[in-house]
Image (cartoon, helix red, strand yellow):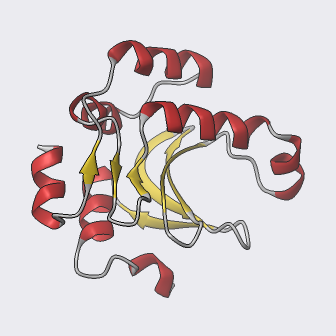
């Protein structure tokens, strides 16, 4: 479903090979919470998807684990920004903003984190809506807020 959806929205997205269940379990153990079911379903088909400019529409499991560990544990991030523990960063934009789903408490919404002012704005109602908005007719939909 996910590859068909993304491919129907953009022919320019490059997919990673299928993800590994063991890596997903390791990410859950390291991060201390379950990964969202929709992302796990996506990763079972493709371990990441990048747009024509190389930015992650959906990061690989390893990228998600590394980025989230960095943002949650780095003293520099803790001193500059609100906590990232409730979020799971999973996508990136050309402008440096990051997309995240809420994992504490778990809910399907996707937010965009603005790296310049640390705001977190609602962007989509789940992974499917995020992909449709991100890859649809206006890929900069979130930039106009």
**Residue found at x 9% / y 50%:** 4
Q: Quadrant of residue 10?
A: bottom left
The percent coordinates of residue 137 (x first, y second) are: 23, 80
> Residue farthest to the top?
22
Left or right of 136: which side holds 74?
A: right
Q: From the viewer's perspective, is residue 2 above or below residue 125? A: above
Rendered residue at 58%/65% (across/down): 97
Work out whether 116 lies above or below 129. Answer: below
Q: Nearer the viewer, residue 52 or 64?
A: 52
What residue sits 44% from the left and 59% below the top? 55
Q: Is residue 45 left or right of residue 126?
A: left
The reply, left or right, for residue 51 in relation to residue 27 is left
From the viewer's perspective, is 40 left or right of 3? right
The picture places residue 114, in percent across and down from the top left corner, at 63, 68
Q: Quadrant of residue 121?
A: bottom right
Residue 120: x, y in percent? 61, 64
In this picture, is 134 found above or below 19? below
Percent position (x, y) of residue 49? 32, 48
Which residue is the extreme one toward the front?
53
Name the foreground residue: 41 vs 109. Answer: 41
**Quarter of the image with the N terminus in it:** top left
């Amino acid at each position: 479903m996910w590859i068909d959806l993304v491919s129907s929205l953009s022919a320019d997205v490059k997919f990673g090979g299928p993800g590994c269940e063991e890596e997903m379990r390791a990410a859950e153990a390291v991060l201390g919470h379950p990964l969202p079911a929709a992302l796990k379903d996506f990763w079972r088909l493709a371990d990441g998807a990048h747009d024509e400019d190389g930015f992650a529409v959906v990061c690989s499991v390893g990228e998600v684990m590394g980025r989230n560990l960095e943002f949650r544990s780095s003293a520099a991030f803790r001193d500059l920004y609100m906590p990232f523990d409730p979020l799971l960063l999973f996508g990136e934009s050309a402008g440096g903003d990051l997309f995240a789903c809420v994992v504490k408490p778990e809910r399907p919404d996707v937010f965009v984190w603005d790296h310049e002012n640390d705001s977190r704005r609602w962007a989509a109602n789940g992974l499917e809506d995020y992909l449709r908005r991100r890859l649809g007719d206006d890929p900069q939909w979130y930039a106009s807020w």
